[in-house]
Amino acid sequence: MNFFKNIYQKITNNNNIMSSKISINGTTYYGDNVVVNGNNQIIIDGKSITCDDKEISIHVEGDVNSVQSTNAPISINGNVKQDVKTTNGGVTCIDILGNVTTINGDLTCHTLKGKF
């Protein structure tokens, strides 16, 4: 029984809300907010993850609240409910309900409801 409880807590992020599946270079995490900084440090829902790989690839299945990327491309098979901030990392998703701030990052989405 503890096995299934642990799986449920990981999927729901201990908040009884279904979190998105986030794959980082093949390793799976669950969360709703993704930040990638220039030191290959990834933060998912406030929890820090260090990636030793030179290149980081992030793919999200489901909606996320917010996305920030310094150098890593982020592909989202879902929507961004709040803001997207990117420096050199491109972001691909379905819709962005918030605002977008970018310097050199590419942005691909169907609909942007906020400001660019």
Image: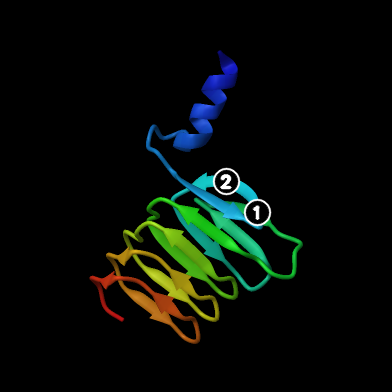
The structure residue drawn at horizontal position 57% and vertical position 61%, both measured from the top left corner, is 58
Instruction: For label 2, count other residues whose C-alpha is less than 10 Å away and answer few (under 14), some (14-19) or many (20+).
Output: some
| Residue 57 pos. (x, y %) | 61, 64
x and y, in percent, of residue 50 in the image: 70, 57
| Contact (Cβ within 8 Å) of mark 2 with mark 1 | yes
> In the shown orientation, is residue 30 left or right of residue 39?
left
**Where's residue 65, x and y in %?**
37, 56
Q: Residue at x 65, y 66 (%)?
A: 56
Q: Nearer the viewer, residue 12 or 74?
A: 74
Seen in the picture, residue 19 relative to 55 is either above or below; the reply is: above
The residues tagged by marks 2 and 1 sit, at their Cα atoms, a distance apart of 10 Å
Mark 2 or mark 1, earlier in chain: 2
Residue topped by disc 2: 29
Which residue is found at the position 23% from the left and 70% from the top? 113
Mark 1 Cα-neighbour bin, 10 Å: few <14, some 14–19, many ≥20: some
Marks 2 and 1: which is nearer the front? 2
Front residue of 27/12: it is 27
Under mark 2, the amino acid is Tyr
Quarter of the picture containing the N terminus is: top right
Helix, strand or loop at label 2? It is strand
Quarter of the picture holding the C terminus: bottom left
Number of numbered discs on residues: 2
**Residue 112 has which mark?**
none
Relative placement, left or right, of 52 versus 68 is right
Q: Quadrant of residue 114?
A: bottom left
At horizontal 31% and vertical 66% (from top left) the residue drawn is 96
| x and y, in percent, of residue 30 in the image | 52, 44
Q: Amino acid at mark 1?
A: Ile
Q: Which residue is mark 1?
A: 49
Give the structural element (helix, strand or loop) at label 1. strand
* 2 vs 59: above or below: above
Viewer-closest of 35 and 105: 105
